Amino acid sequence: MIDPKTLAARFPGDFLFGVATAAYQIEGSARADGRKQSIWDAFSKMPGRVHNGDSGDVACDHYNRLDEDLDLIKEMGVEAYRFSIAWPRIIPEGVGRINEKGLDFYDRLVDGCKARGIKTFATLYHWDLPLALMGDGGWAARSTAYAFQRYAKVVMARIGDRLDAVATFNEPWCSVWLSHLYGIHAPGERNMRAALAAMHHTNLAHGLAVEAIRHVTPNVPVGLVLNAHSVIAGSDSAGDKAAAERAFDFHNGAFFGPVFKGEYPKSLVSALGDKMPAVEDGDLAVINQKLDWWGLNYYTPMRVLDDARQGAEFPATQPAPFVNPEKTDIGWEIFPSAMTDLVVDLYDRYELPEMYITENGACYNTEVENGEVNDQPRLDYISDHLAAAADLISKGLPVKGYFAWSLMDNFEWAEGYSMRFGLVHVDYETQVRTVKKSGKWYTQLAAQFPKGNHRAG
């Protein structure tokens, strides 16, 4: 563990410390006030898709405990809150009627943050696509990109005047590859053609939403949150190094390429172009609009070996063994320096704006004992990754803030409630919140900011 004051001295005085959540993971109230079903509501009801048959029907009951939870953020002393907006609350069918009661909830959320002096970082899409849009094909359909543009416009017209920043998407890698190719997340497809269609239409939706946001609220900084993968070759062999480069193009370049360069990676197009949907004239120009910021979600490196089997589908890789035997309770390797190397590499490859670490944290399933949660491993994980972020700043990279994932334990997607990432423990039976040791430490760190030491390094 690093002493909070020692660590604080490594950051500029205006560095932003925040916490992050996502709507479906905490809100509950899945049928309240006009909200209709999302793909995650449907997916979690399918046998065998989510651990223990868990769903977000109740989650952390945040919808009914909004003020209590905003007080908690205020008490933790962090300066900013990153949250997502549930599309099925705003436009329940994805298109058509706007649900005023859904907008009212986010009005209260944003006003509540402002009243408590908490900065607001909103994410428009954190995976909860209105289920009705699956009738047209969901993200595999081009029409969904235009539906998203209208949704973005509606949200920003209502709450944009009080937002400090907005992101279009959270981790399109998950809502594209994990959801349409690997079948692990909703809608649970395993089809490369569908995945490539979802990739392009998500990228297009991002660009269309940037246009809408800038039209409605030109002064709100707009960005995109990407879980860029730190792809590391499992050996120094030429085959494994080539595999790592293919994996980079597939896992990172599929999103960074069109957004920041206006093109898809050549290797991806060469290998899979015949399965891609039509990239219409002007699409790439819409996608490739300059952003004000971008967010990195980082947890663990991706180690790969060449998959030399005949007919192995691009990127033709297989997992390589971990280098560090230490892993979190979800089974992810702990390797903070990979985050530093990744960001340096991304700034070498692309012209990127300033950035925030929009998610970073660790799964440890420590329970309450005598009113306390001693989650020292999580505290160590966060302090080590913050030290890695400070290394980036000392190298001159424009890292402006850090959001711990997550404010509280919540619905962990396909893992249900079996995995805990929170700085705050949630008893799902009673909904009692208990700030963990890591949360108390994070409060001590955040208390050092903002301060007068506006320097880099």
Image: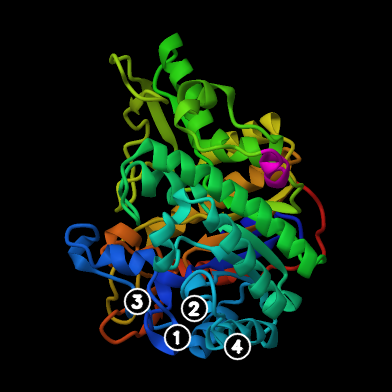
Question: Circle 4 sits on which residue?
Answer: 108
Toward the viewer: 330 or 447?
A: 330
**Going 47% across and 17% down the picture, which residue do you hit?**
241
Mark found first going from the N terminus, 4 or 2 = 2
Q: Is residue 202 above or below residue 352?
A: below
Give the structural element (helix, strand or loop) at label 2: helix
Q: Check whether the beta carbons of the residues at disc 1 and disc 4 lie within 8 A of each other.
A: no
Q: Is residue 194 above or below residue 120?
A: above
Marks 3 and 2, Cα distance to the nearest angstrom?
16 Å
Residue 111 pos. (x, y %)? 66, 86
Give the residue at mark 2: 89
Q: Give the left or right position of residue 171, taking residue 416 as reference.
A: right
- Within 10 Å of disc 3 (Cα), the crowding (few <14, some 14-19, many 20+) is many
Dominant SS of magenta comes to: helix
Dot 1 or dot 4: first in sequence order is: 1
Amino acid type shown at disc 2:
Arg
Q: Earlier in the sequence, mark 1 or mark 3?
A: 1
The residue at 36%/25% (across/down) is 313
Where does the image place residue 293, in percent across and percent down from the top left?
A: 71, 53
Residue 386 relative to residue 196: left or right: right
Give the number of the mark in front: 1 or 4: 1
Q: Residues within 10 Å of mark 2 (few under 14, many from 20)?
A: many
Q: Amino acid at mark 3?
A: Ala
Q: Is residue 218 magenta?
A: no
Give the color scheme: rainbow, by chain, secondary structure or one colour.
rainbow
Q: Can see residue 249?
A: yes
Mark nearest the camera among 4 and 2 is 2
Q: Position of residue 267 (x, y in %)?
A: 53, 22
Q: Which mark is residue 59?
A: 3
Distance between mark 2 and mark 1 Cα atoms: 7 Å
Question: Which residue is disc 1 drawn over?
Answer: 34
